[in-house]
Image: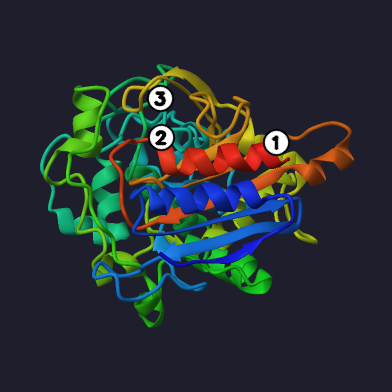
Amino acid sequence: MSISGFTAAGFEPVREAFEKNFTGGHEHGASFAAFVGDELVVDLRGGFADRAGEIPWAEDTLCPVYSATKPVGAMVIATLVERGKLDYDSPVADYWPEFAANGKGAFTVAEALSHQAGIPGFPDPIDPSLWLDPPALSVELAKLKPMWGRGEGSGYHPLTWGYIAGELVRRVSKRSLGTILREDICKPLGIDFWIGLPESEHGRVAQLLKPKTAARFPHNNEATRAAFLTPWAAANRGATEWRLAEIPSANGHGTAAALARLYSAYALKGRIGETRVIAPVMWDELTRARVSGEDRVLPGTVAFGAGVMRNLPLIYGPNPSTLCHSGWGGSGAFRPPDTRPPAASLLNPSGGYIMNRQGTHLLEDDRRSRLIDALYRCL
């Protein structure tokens, strides 16, 4: 199994952990990248991008990162809050009046982005193809009655989160969320990450190997069934139409280095390299915990900012304040909390992991954990 890429001096244990994931038979194709401050210290790739094992995973191989997309979409939302187009504390219905239907009128933007809006999925059947038409899906989403009341905690919104975020942007901007990401952040900074992947880039996308066993869900309740367990809970992930659609909750595509680079904005209080993407005061509003406690869908105690998760299960290193997000099948990205004095924040790492052999856990993945543990040992 060929392993290629770059490892800075002192980070050799990360490469060793990456190689062991392959020699142990846990990977088919994968990539892991990490920045410390602005410096790329790890950029590794190995295995195959295709199921047949004939096409090596390349530097520019793209992979869907599923829910690890959410903090990237949340970053775009924060730029619109900073410009006065949106307000975290205003009701969603101020921008999207139809959202007020069936008792949702008081839910704020921040509450919706922190999975408190009570609409993790559709309890009654819908045409699954609606997921590939975000405006049409949003019409149906706005009609739903919340499964719990305002102030009654969170229930993870695996897909619907992205349609709320995307529709909010559509209501206040002439450009879509994916377009803003591309034009204002990724293209100027040379970051190979997309929400809404042009068909010209589809040839670079890794083919997924789905798990042979079913995903493990901690709850068997109405919220979990609507979120994950009905035949209409998702569209055909991986189809051309799915890649083309902008689904800020689930269909971001990128390289591991691109994912880590975007998450470095969380490590550096809104800065990527020399570019200020989010003002420090807005970074605080984006990242502070909006809700914490037992989630109705995810396992254990969780805490969410306005679209980013905190590391309460301690699967992204030792600090519960680390900002992070996992993606379906095992992908994930993270950044630890700021340290003091302020200059020490330049030592904060950010990391991104992508792969095409999918696992079954909602949050954890042993392969990713081994890499993160090795990275922390090097710091």
Above or below residue 80? Residue 193 is below
Q: What kind of residue is marked 1? A: Asp
Q: Which residue is drawn at 47% across and 43% down?
A: 368
Q: Mark 1 points at which residue?
A: 284
Percent x, y of residue 298: 35, 27
Which quarter shows the C terminus?
top right
Q: What kind of residue is marked 3? A: Ser
Q: Mark 3 points at which residue?
A: 154
Quarter of the image for residue 227 reads top left
Q: How crowded is mark 1: few (under 14 residues within 10 Å), some or many (20 or more)?
A: some
339 or 86, which is in the foreground? 339
Q: Which residue is drawn at 34% across and 59% down?
A: 28
Q: Residue at x 69, y 56 (%)?
A: 41
Q: How crowded is mark 3: few (under 14 residues within 10 Å), some or many (20 or more)?
A: many
Percent x, y of residue 164: 40, 46
Q: Distance between the residues labelled 1 and 2?
A: 26 Å
Which mark identifies residue 364? 2
Q: How far apart are marks 1 and 3 (CA)?
A: 20 Å
